[in-house]
Image (cartoon, rainbow, N blue to C red):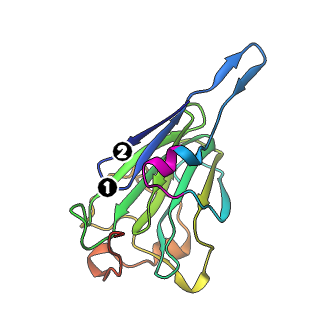
Amino acid sequence: MITIIPLKLPGAYEITLSPIEDERGYFVETYRADLFAERGMVIDWVQDNQSLSRQRGVVRGLHFQLPPHTQTKLLRALSGVIWDVFVDLRTDSPTFGQWDAVELSAAKMNLAYVPKGFAHGFSTLTDNCILSYKVDAYYAREADTGILWNSPSLAIPWPAADPLLSEKDRSLIPFAAFVSPFRMAP
């Protein structure tokens, strides 16, 4: 059984899986196109990605691809615990500039669905976190960008006080300087 719960930002969802268990282990459905389609969610995934963060306190993000290469993401922690964060960048959205977060963990068997027009990032809460995610548009290097993870105007209370960051993520612009090209889907 798959439970899909809307989050506070329109179009974002937390998805919880319910495994069938016995003495051998478990079986679980991790995706059902029919349940997604009923809610108007993306069902045509074109690329699967996976990242490993070796230690607690890694922050990746806040990333997105510019139009016409925007991506919807379906994210799941295969190992460890991740604080998954997303920011609404759609200028015509009632929640423009607001953020939300979901704790993803292998033990909870939950996923986050983040639609086009959102920045996405995460912080690792444990060592050896593996994040797997599907996207509905291919990676396009020329469209790959983001906003600064600790932008003061967003006031995201990241759990890592002194995170391990990539050079790319350190050099992103703050949200206040970002001119968004994103709008809500018709």
Considering only vertical position in the picture, is 46 above or below 172? above
Quadrant of image for the N terminus = top right
Task: Give the class, few, some or many, for how many residues have Cα within 10 Å of label 1's Cα (few <14, many ≥20).
Answer: some
Magenta span contains residue 36? yes
Residue plotted at (46% across, 80% down): 66
Q: Which residues are magenta?
A: 35-42
Quadrant of residue 182 within the rendered picture: bottom left
Q: Is residue 9 visible?
A: yes
Q: Position of residue 93 (x, y in %)?
A: 25, 66
Q: Which mark is residue 10?
A: 1
Considering only vertical position in the picture, is 24 above or below 81? above
Q: Position of residue 33 (x, y in %)?
A: 58, 48
Residue plotted at (37% across, 56% down): 11
Residue holding disc 2: 6
Task: Using the image as rendered, state which of residue 42 and residue 153 is in the foreground.
Answer: 42
Task: Give the class, few, some or many, for how many residues have Cα within 10 Å of label 2's Cα (few <14, many ≥20).
Answer: few
Q: Secondary structure at mark 1?
A: loop
The amino acid at mark 2 is Pro
Task: Using the image as rendered, state which of residue 107 and residue 12 is in the foreground.
Answer: 12
The amino acid at mark 1 is Pro
